[in-house]
Image: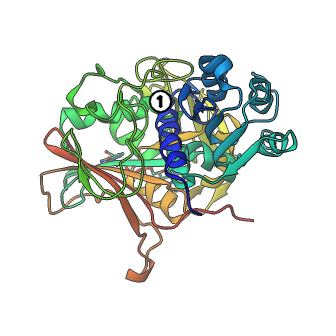
């Protein structure tokens, strides 16, 4: 489809605005909107900042006021057509007298879809699919959740340059720098849940809480306030913060004004902690069970455990619990995004099952030569079965490097 340059430019701005909602809109999508007046001048801009708050269209229309009449609205996601916590955006656009609506991505949620059809039925000109790939990327967590009925998974690991996450004697603290660890806390804070295996809980007794530092930390420069994983511009370039960008994402704007609002945001949020523990072996005094954040312990339906905790009973599958069932149960609890912190055994099973949507790797300029690999068995028997990824971003974080990658093929829902 040939896209007029003006449409592409205004939609690119709407996508940028949508990114301001990262980490704070869950369980809602991030959405951005730009409204032009009848002369084609920008009259209003908006984004959805937190669940229960006004939708992007409503914010932009309020800013535009009467100037919206006869104008054009650019929206990154099809305007909703249902009454949830707020009224339908399709009606708001009609009431404002907008003559044309340009949409990037249709709404996959059957409850909310229908906005484009209603607008067309009322004589509004509707164009769909403008900058669809960019708008998909900015909203990827929510679109995975809405389309696949499971939480979106970001697997994070820290390793030496030779891919090891512990020395031969099991010691692993610390491989990466304080700057890299601070960055992890910011990414944790933007997730709805932090997931770890019982092996990690028994070995390290982690808190699994988000303790982001000040947002002016050097590691956050140029990447917003840590809410969400930074996206990068098309092609390969050196960014002002020194990071080398590759891939076809979009810029995650700096200074996310939404962070800290609603259920989340760096600083105020307490993501759910989840331990994957088939037999219920989590020690009663484990730090992950303290009261600094809510915790779910996922155990087998038939596990005989006296553990006093919020238990999520799941069917068994393969070498442990059914991980698809885990992600579906979490989605049912409105967990849109999961930050998977391993360890290697659990991460390998997530990968084997096609349940890793994004990888964030922190690599330290160090070599071990022996010791635990960052990733355990992941269903690869021969080189042709290797899990191929593509890089989205390569950034220096203190003395380390952060790599963001994603599977080369997109996951699909099993029938
Ligand atoms: N460098 C890093 O980024 C990083 C991050 C995290 C951890 N670590 C290190 O990793 C080590 C622990 O890792 P680990 O591999 O031993 O343990 P793990 O991956 O944390 O946990 C594995 C355990 O999870 C349980 N489980 C339940 N369902 C499962 C399923 N479907 N698939 C796989 N496992 C399932 C199994 O125990 P049950 O059968 O008893 O349920 C399994 O043994 C620690 O030394 C820690 O320091 C490093």
Q: Is residue 380 visible?
A: yes
Residue 45 appears at what percent x and percent y?
54, 26
Using residue 168 as the reference point, say whether residue 117 is left or right of it. right
Residue highlighted by disc 1: 20
What residue is rendered at 64% in x and 40% in y? 330
* Quadrant, the C terminus: bottom right
**278 and 144: which is toward the camera:** 144
Circle 1 packing at 10 Å, graded few (<14), some (14-19), many (20+), is many
Give how far across and how far down residue 234 sits, in percent. Answer: 37, 55
Residue 398 position (above or below residue 37):
below
Q: Where is residue 65 in the image (x, y as percent from the top left)?
A: 65, 17
Q: Left or right: 125 with respect to 145?
A: right
Residue extending farthest right: 121
Question: Circle 1 sits in a helix, a strand or a loop, which is it?
Answer: loop
Q: In this view, does 325 lie above or below 188?
A: below
At horizontal 57% and vertical 36% (from top left) the residue drawn is 297
- Could you tell whether 229 is left or right of 270 in the image? left
Front-most of residues 280 and 57: 57
**Looking at the image, can residue 53 be seen?**
no
Q: Considering the image in quadrants, where does the N terminus appear?
A: bottom right
């Amino acid at each position: 489809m040939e896209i007029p340059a003006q449409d592409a430019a205004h939609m690119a701005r709407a996508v940028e605005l949508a990114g301001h909602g990262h980490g704070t809109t869950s369980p809602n999508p991030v959405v951005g909107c730009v409204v032009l007046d009848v002369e084609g001048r920008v009259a209003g801009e908006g984004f959805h900042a937190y669940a229960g708050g006004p939708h992007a269209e409503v914010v932009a229309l309020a800013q535009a006021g009467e100037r919206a009449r006869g104008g054009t609205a650019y929206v990154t996601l099809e305007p909703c057509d249902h009454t949830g916590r707020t009224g339908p955006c399709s009606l708001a656009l009609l009431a404002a007298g907008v003559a044309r609506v340009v949409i990037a991505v249709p709404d996959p949620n059957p409850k909310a879809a229908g906005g484009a059809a209603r607008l067309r039925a009322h004589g509004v000109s509707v164009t769909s699919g403008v900058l669809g790939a960019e708008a998909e990327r900015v909203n990827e967590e929510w679109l995975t959740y809405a389309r696949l009925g499971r939480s979106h998974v970001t697997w994070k690991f820290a390793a030496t340059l030779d891919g090891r996450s512990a020395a031969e004697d099991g010691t692993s603290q610390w491989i990466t720098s304080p700057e890299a660890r601070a960055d992890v806390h910011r990414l944790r804070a933007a997730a709805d849940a932090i997931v770890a295996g019982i092996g990690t809980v028994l070995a390290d007794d982690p808190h699994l809480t988000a303790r982001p530092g000040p947002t002016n930390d050097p590691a956050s420069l140029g990447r917003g306030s840590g809410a969400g994983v930074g996206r990068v511009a098309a092609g390969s370039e050196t960014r002002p913060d020194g990071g080398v960008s590759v891939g076809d994402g979009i810029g995650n704007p700096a200074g996310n004004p939404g962070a800290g609002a609603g259920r989340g945001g760096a600083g105020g949020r307490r993501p759910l902690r989840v331990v994957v523990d088939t037999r219920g072996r989590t020690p009663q005094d484990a730090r992950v069970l303290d009261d600094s954040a809510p915790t779910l312990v996922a155990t087998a339906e038939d596990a005989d455990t006296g553990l006093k905790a919020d238990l999520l009973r799941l069917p068994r599958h393969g070498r442990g619990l059914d991980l698809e069932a885990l992600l579906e149960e979490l989605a049912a609890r409105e967990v849109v995004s999961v930050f998977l912190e391993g360890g290697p055994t659990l991460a390998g099973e997530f990968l084997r099952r096609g349940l890793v949507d994004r990888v964030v790797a922190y690599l330290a300029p160090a070599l071990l030569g022996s010791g635990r690999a960052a990733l355990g068995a992941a269903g690869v028997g021969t080189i042709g079965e290797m899990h191929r990824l593509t890089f989205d971003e390569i950034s220096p974080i203190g003395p380390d490097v952060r790599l963001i990658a994603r599977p080369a093929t997109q996951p699909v829902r099993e029938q």
